[in-house]
Amino acid sequence: RRALFSNRYKLQAFDDSPMYESSKYLSQLYRGFFSMLLLRSSMLDGFETNHIYSSTSRASTVRYATTSTAVNAEISELMLEYDPILLFASRLLPSSVAADASALYAWCRRLDEICDKPGADPKETREKIDDWEIRLDKLWIGEPVDAMDAELVECLQRHQPNLDEGPFRNMITGMRSDAVENRRVADMDELEEYAYQVAGTVGLMLLPLLDANFVLAKEPAICLGKAVQLINILRDASPDAALGRIYLPQDQLRAQNVKEIDVLALKSSPEYCAVVEFVSNRASELLVQAEKGRTSLPGLGPLFVQIIVELYRGYLEELQRRGYNNLAATGERVKINKIRKFTASLTALQKVLLS
């Protein structure tokens, strides 16, 4: 609990804007909110509060056991920098599940960083992705390359055969499609397939960790991942344009007579905003499907899902408030403030408790 409520993880993890005068009050609310969740989880599900777990007996991973705590802290730093919402939601998971989920996150995030390095040569990026796939081969035979890989090896060993290679391979395929100059997406079908490859696969990776009924939970998990990815694409339109990437469906842009040169120059228009709204509406539909399937998860799984749903609905509401103009002259991504994140969390809690 001391780690959970340390200054590092109070409001800084969710700080997309300057500190509010009410930050001290909000911090106290966060502390009370999470204290209640931890108490509830310990009573109902017997969850532990210690994030340190024993190493497997495999010789390849034992040598990393003493660094487990340090590695978990390093992974939390990654989440804090790139995906604070996931760090926020992960605190609702049992300690062993959170550790395994963090190991999966580290693998996915480091792969993503290979593809999103500004100014990187596409050929070199493809070579690095090929190397990453070789590292994946080694993971499956228990030969980690570094300490983060060792954490993932332990996770794989705990959850095989339910946690298989398919989602990992599919994610690599999706990331490889980004390793080109002037990345474009033909239509909504291609965009949704890409969203599945790079994010829907994460849902499939997490299901074995959550001990979920795979048959019931598979489609909602994929829908949640795809929704998150579509919304992040809408949020990241400006920084993606700086990389020469346009993820909005080309057929929709052509139908609205939107020119690529204007998008890359961050010049919005009513026609461009109509395409953003089109993708936003599809993301909203996927969130609804994910929300309906939350009851297929055990323990605090439904709350974990509902919080992510509500937070990402907040981004869709912000896009709507802006008239679906997601092209910022400053090149920044679309953000929401701490108060809206906290409100979304309370809304999620209310929905889950009332259901």
Image (cartoon, rainbow, N blue to C red):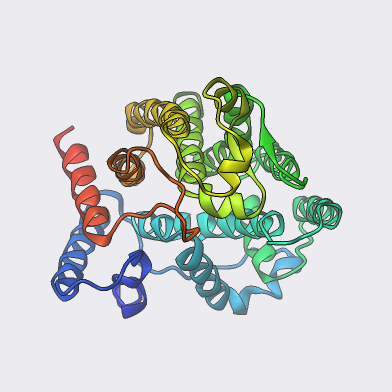
* Whether residue 172 is visible: yes
Count up the numbered dots. 0
Front residue of 139 and 279 = 279
User: Left or right of 320: which side holds 171?
Assistant: right
Q: Where on the picture, by quarter, is residue 198? A: top right
Residue at point 17% right, 76% down? Answer: 24
User: Left or right of 291: which side holds 180?
Assistant: right
Decide: is 246 above or below 278: below
Question: If the image is split into quadrants, where does the C terminus sit?
Answer: top left
Q: Which residue lies furthest to the top in this view?
A: 255
Decide: is 108 above or below 220: below
x and y percent of residue 248 in the render? 56, 34
Residue at point 67% right, 71% down? Answer: 147
Residue at point 75% right, 55% down? Answer: 139
Residue at point 55% right, 31% down? Answer: 258
x and y percent of residue 335 in the render? 37, 55
Front residue of 307 and 354 = 307
Decide: is 14 above or below 348: below
